[in-house]
Image: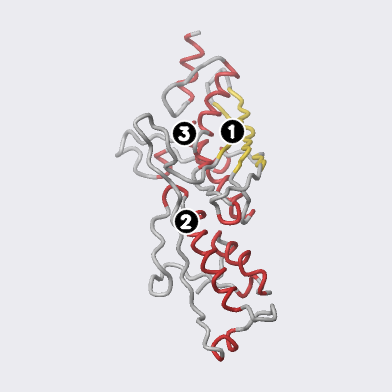
């Protein structure tokens, strides 16, 4: 078992707070289906919602089992002595429905929303673009663990800058390494990255939380490209916006 500041740990703690259990007493079991049920893939930013809701249901069932008639809570030894189960499995099914012929429906129950803003500088002599600041206004529901969500969003913004300016995978032989593929160096990522949270609790998210994994890479690259256009009037339509592309656009004006 390992301790980690994961969304599921935060959900479990929130559900078990009534029992007086502190966060340091909650342990997360990872990658061991002999001790934890298979919660499915982590794609589609589903972990926080799907595994989170299942965790919430299991933890609430445990809290109910721990509760005494007088309103206090049993510990492990007391539960065993009273022949009360100490192991609970939580399940949750998303209340989603397929889209109709007009593409209207609810294929997902919980969404994320964000606004991206990029401040860029373009060297008109070389066409080189530098991102000086990135801002993301993010609505990922109620934030479960600020440190974890910060890390997701900062990482996605950094990926977005690489996607916009340097990353190119068209030539497999040339781009078979991280450096060759154009993955940005730390100096190409601005120190000034601002995250602004708008917390709108989701009715189908665990304690109001939504996912956060995919939001930060949805369109930071578009913000960078729009920044280039607003800075020098060059519209890049095929990524990455390499200096030679921007310079060609400047020379064609």
Tell which tag, 2 or 1, sits nearer the viewer.
2
Residue 208 image offset from top left, x and y in percent:
60, 52
Kindly identify which residue carries mark 3.
166
Image point (34%, 31%), residue name: 101
Image point (58%, 37%), residue name: 114
Which secondary structure lies at badge 2?
A: helix
Q: CA distance from mark 1 to mark 3?
A: 19 Å
Q: CA distance from mark 2 to mark 1?
A: 27 Å
Can you tell which mark lies on residue 10? none
Please report contact status of discs 1 and 3: CB closer than 8 Å, yes or no. Answer: no
Nearer-the-camera pick, 146 or 61: 61
Tell which tag, 1 or 3, sits nearer the viewer.
1
N-term mark: 2 or 1? 2
Asked which quadrant contains residue 129, the reply is top right
Can you tell which mark lies on residue 50? 2
Residue 98 image offset from top left, x and y in percent:
37, 41
Residue sitting at the far top: 253
* Count of numbered tags: 3
Residue sitting at the far bottom: 81
Residue 205 image offset from top left, x and y in percent:
55, 52
Tell which tag, 2 or 3, sits nearer the viewer.
2
Kindly identify which residue carries mark 1.
116
Residue 158 in sight here:
no
Q: Is residue 130 above or below residue 55?
A: above
Scheme of image coloration: secondary structure
């Amino acid at each position: 078992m390992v301790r980690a500041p994961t969304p599921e740990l935060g959900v479990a703690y929130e559900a078990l707070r009534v029992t007086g259990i502190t966060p340091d007493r909650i342990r997360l079991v990872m990658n061991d289906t002999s001790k934890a049920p298979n919660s499915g893939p982590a794609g589609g930013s589903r972990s926080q919602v799907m595994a989170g809701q299942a965790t919430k249901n299991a933890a609430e069932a445990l809290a109910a089992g721990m509760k005494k008639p007088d309103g206090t809570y049993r510990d492990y030894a007391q539960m065993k002595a009273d022949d009360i189960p100490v192991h609970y499995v939580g399940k949750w099914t998303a209340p989603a429905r397929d889209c109709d012929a007009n593409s209207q429906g609810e294929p997902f129950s919980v969404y994320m929303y964000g606004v991206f803003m990029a401040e860029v500088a373009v060297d008109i002599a070389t066409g080189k673009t530098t991102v000086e600041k990135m801002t993301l206004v993010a609505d990922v529901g109620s934030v479960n663990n600020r440190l974890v969500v910060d890390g997701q969003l900062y990482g996605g913004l950094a990926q977005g800058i690489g996607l916009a300016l340097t990353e190119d995978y068209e030539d497999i032989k040339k781009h078979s390494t991280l450096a060759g593929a154009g993955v940005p160096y730390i100096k190409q990522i601005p120190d000034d990255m601002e995250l602004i949270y708008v917390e709108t609790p989701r009715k189908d998210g665990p304690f109001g939380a939504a996912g956060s994994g995919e939001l930060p890479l949805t369109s930071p690259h578009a913000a960078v490209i729009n920044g280039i256009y607003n800075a020098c009037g060059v519209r890049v339509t095929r990524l990455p916006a390499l200096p030679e592309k921007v310079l060609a656009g400047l020379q064609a004006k």
